[in-house]
């Protein structure tokens, strides 16, 4: 019968190296005094045995694990995949280990607290938002520093780094009007999504300033299939509007495929389309999508100093809200409107 694997202990290393167990402990502890010769013996023995130190006792002693929970809902949304990569690289540079936590919700952290109470993590980070004050209070009760993207609420233990959704959406509205559009639609993200609501607010308010109070709205749930189906729904209601803004790029890509392949409407000749995020797929030649940059790298760079400050404090240190500017990138899905059709700007 196959025996269970046994990990070598510090006692085994000490015995092989001919040193005390405390010497092994000092060799694997930063800042502890140990001679160069003793350290050499310890590491040679550890390598021979395949030994690595067990950090569980250190967690119990220092009440710090060095673990940061990075929460994702899956990598189907390219923006979340980019944010996960950026968070992981940034945390490893600061000497933290990443504990990847998968949740079912596709747009918020609100139901996560019961699971995280059992983890010995130093902090929680996520591109998913905390949407309600009740959920924010629940995170505060477990006293784990938490940073999330596009979160409408914060407190002493919950901090948010937001993209300028209103500003980005306003820029899209300006561009559509400049290109000659006179009727408009917005495809929303998940129900209750703060980012989607902010993008809708910015888009709608700017269109009103331009003298266009009417706006068609369809739900897309941040999914490719949702964007595709939203176009079908808009077509069933009546003529497709001149310009369609989607709350993220994934829905915009679905909308483009529905317009061109299912309904047979030309983009940009008949309809203008824009998204939000600037995921890599947006620049692919098949889509060449006009979009607003939600810079995950910059958002993580803004989050990390706050996170370090929160983790180094023995009391509350959060409660801040940082807004990262957004930038409109125009590609071929929005072209200048003329009497003879649409041509490239400039």
Image (cartoon, grey):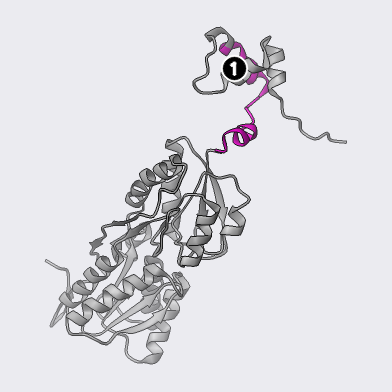
The residue beneath circle 1 is 43
Q: Is residue 232 left or right of residue 97?
A: left
Give percent across and percent down for residue 177: 18, 77
Foreground residue, 346 or 120?
120
The residue most toward the front is 315
Q: Position of residue 336 (x, y in %)?
A: 16, 73
Identify the residue shown where x is 68% and y is 9%: 18
Residue 169 seen from this side: yes
Q: Nearer the viewer, residue 292 or 207?
A: 207
What residue is rendered at 72% in x and 13% in y? 15
**Residue 24 at x, y = what percent?**
63, 18
Q: From which residue to which does the magenta span run?
A: 39-65
Q: How many labels were placed on the picture?
A: 1
Q: Spot the residue most to the top.
A: 37
Q: Main secondary structure of the magenta part?
A: helix
For the residue pair 40 and 233, the one nearer the viewer reads as: 40
Q: Within the magenta stretch, is there residue 63?
A: yes
């Amino acid at each position: 019968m196959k025996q269970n694997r046994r990990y070598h202990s510090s006692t085994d290393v000490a015995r092989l190296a001919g040193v005390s167990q405390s010497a092994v402990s000092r060799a694997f502890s930063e800042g502890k005094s140990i001679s160069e010769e003793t350290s050499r013996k310890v590491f040679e023995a550890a390598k021979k045995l395949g030994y690595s130190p067990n950090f569980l006792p250190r967690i119990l002693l220092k009440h710090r694990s060095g673990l940061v929970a990075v929460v994702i809902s899956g990598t189907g949304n390219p923006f979340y995949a980019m944010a996960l990569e950026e968070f992981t690289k940034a945390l490893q540079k600061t000497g933290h280990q990443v504990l990847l936590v998968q949740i079912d919700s596709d747009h918020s952290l609100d139901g996560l607290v019961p699971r995280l109470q059992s983890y010995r993590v130093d902090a929680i980070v996520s591109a998913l938002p905390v949407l309600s004050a009740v959920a924010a209070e629940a995170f505060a009760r477990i006293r784990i520093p938490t940073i999330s993207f596009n979160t409408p609420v914060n407190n002493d233990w919950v901090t948010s780094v937001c993209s300028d959704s209103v500003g980005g959406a306003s820029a899209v509205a300006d561009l559509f009007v400049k290109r000659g559009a006179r009727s408009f639609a917005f495809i929303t993200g998940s129900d209750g999504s703060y980012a989607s609501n902010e993008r809708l607010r910015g888009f709608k308010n700017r269109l009103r300033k331009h003298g266009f109070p009417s706006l068609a709205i369809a739900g897309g749930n941040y999914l490719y299939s949702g964007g595709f189906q939203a176009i079908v729904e808009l077509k069933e209601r009546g003529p497709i509007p001149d310009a369609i803004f989607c709350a993220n790029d994934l829905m915009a890509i679905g909308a483009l495929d529905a317009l061109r392949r299912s309904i047979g409407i030309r983009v940009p000749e008949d309809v203008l389309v824009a998204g939000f995020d600037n995921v890599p797929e947006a620049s692919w030649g098949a889509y060449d999508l006009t979009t607003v940059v939600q810079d995950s790298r910059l958002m993580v760079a803004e989050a990390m100093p706050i996170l370090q400050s929160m983790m180094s404090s023995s009391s509350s240190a959060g409660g801040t809200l940082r807004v990262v500017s957004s930038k409109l990138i125009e590609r071929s899905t929005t072209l200048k409107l003329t009497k003879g059709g649409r041509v490239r700007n400039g």
